[in-house]
Image: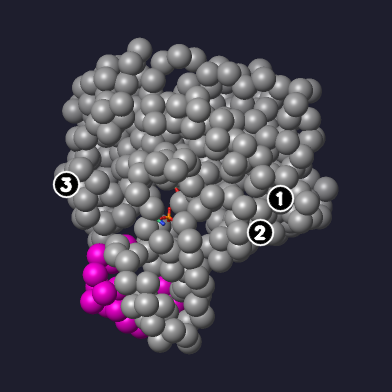
Amino acid sequence: MKYTVLLLGSGGREHALAWSLKKSAQLKKLFIAPGNPGTAEVGENVHLDISDFNKVWNFIQENEIDLTIVGPEQPLVDGIANFLEAKHHPVFGPKLQAAMLEGSKEFAKEFMRRHNIPTAAYEVFEQDDFDKAADYIRSQNKYPVVLKADGLAGGKGVFIPETEDEAMGVLEELKTSSSLKEAASKLVIEEFMVGEEASVFAICDGDSYKIIGNAQDHKRIGEGDTGLNTGGMGAYSPAPVVTDEVLQRVESEIIEPTVSGMKAEGNPYIGILYCGLMITENGPKVVEYNCRFGDPECQVILPRLESDLLEIIVACTQVQLNTVDIHFEDEVKCCVVLASGGYPESYEKGKEISGLDTVEDAIVFHAGTRAENDKILTNGGRVLNIVGSGKSLESAIKNTYKEVAKIDFEKAYYRSDIGAKGLRH
Ligand code: AMP
Ligand code: GLY
């Protein structure tokens, strides 16, 4: 059978998903809503407000879509998988009860507590109980301490104050911040874990799972992991910190109990399970779960995938994941994010991008771009993802930066140390 597929989303992750789906022999036609100028090269972009599920459903019916794949977390946490499943339409992505692993930090922490999944020690406080939160922080008297808004906050809901004064300042800010008010209706206070971060991805059909790669992201805006948190400034895959032994522990102590725990609680997990990990001296612990592929981690994992992504996803939606194999090429991939100067705070848009057609030896995934009169302009904070490869991490990094240097726009910014951490292994 051949499939007409609708992919939801518009970032670099969705360009990588579209690029990978396009290679499938089982693909009849690919629509991306709303997509970006990069996805327009591998499928047909559709002007569609994906937060309006009825409009999505009308499009699915009118275009005889066989399968919908959801890229970003927001529609999943808003219940798009529940909505489409109720229409008997095959959808790849967890239902909202399972997407709560990302949608609510409190839910995720209590789930891990119930199932003995290693993670940082924590307490949860209501917004009105910020005094109790302050008392708790003072009584623990251990810094840094980690404060997290319970709900989705686009990577802006995590604070790591280093002193009591700073921690009290964060509490004060959360009380008054209009942008975080809803996400921070509850507050999770966590022990700070020491170690190296990495992410491991599992694809799940509700019943079983398979590993679909690992990567290391670079979340901070500045070189040497300094400055504000971002959505991710670069990544590489595979990550040497995820040794065979670490991976075995991640599977047996984290992924297996997560998938079987969700199933046992009546919320079978279907989709990509993103395990954000801290590899501590006592083994891997969960920093966070996400209910979708990482961005930019997806951009370094899918180009390594030799198996047919569409075939794997279809098998998932049919609870047949055990019938497919997932294998990767040996090459290492490195992704550098080209961002608008000022990101993750305010930045300008509409800058013309030059040099795209001179890139020879890398894949360029679009994120925050738009097309206008045959030109590609910047249209977001994270603008482009340049993905190079090599036989070793060292050569992947070198090859990637050689191509990054060819692309430019006014106030373009990128980190020049993507992958450096991996070279220390
Ligand atoms: P999150 O959105 O939960 O992934 O948090 C954002 C970033 O904050 C993570 O990528 C870590 O770098 C850091 N972080 C979060 N929780 C902890 C923790 N308990 N210990 C140390 N670092 C943390
Ligand atoms: N790169 C981090 C994320 O996708 O959440």
Query: In the image shown, does 317 or 408 lie closer to the viewer?
Result: 317
Label 2 sits on a secondary structure element that is helix
Q: Residue at x 35, y 19 (%)?
A: 389
Question: Callout 3: 10 Å neighbours few (<14), some, many (20+)?
Answer: few
Which comes before the other along the chain, label 1 or label 2?
A: 2
Residue labelled with disc 1: 261
Q: Residue at x 62, y 53 (%)?
A: 116
Q: Are marks 1 and 2 in contact (CB under 8 Å)?
A: yes
User: Is the residue at mark 3 in contact range of ligand 2, meaning its CB lies under 8 Å from it?
Assistant: no
Res 177 → quadrant: bottom left
Reply yes or no: does residue 172 show up in magenta.
yes
Gap in angstroms between the C-alphas marked 1 and 2: 9 Å
Q: Which mark is residue 114?
A: 2
Which comes before the other along the chain, label 2 or label 3?
A: 2
| Residue 394 in the figure: left or right of residue 311 | left
Gap in angstroms between the C-alphas marked 1 and 3: 47 Å
Residue labelled with disc 3: 411
Q: Residue at x 35, y 49 (%)?
A: 194
The answer to whether residue 136 is visible is yes
Which comes before the other along the chain, label 1 or label 3?
A: 1
- Picture coordinates of residue 410 (x, y %)? 16, 44
Query: In the image shown, does 62 or 158 lie closer to the viewer?
Result: 158
Q: Are marks 1 and 3 in contact (CB under 8 Å)?
A: no
In the picture, the quarter occupied by the C terminus is top left
Res 67 → quadrant: top right
Camera-side mark, 1 or 3: 1
Gap in angstroms between the C-alphas marked 2 and 3: 48 Å
Q: Which residues are magenta?
A: 160-181
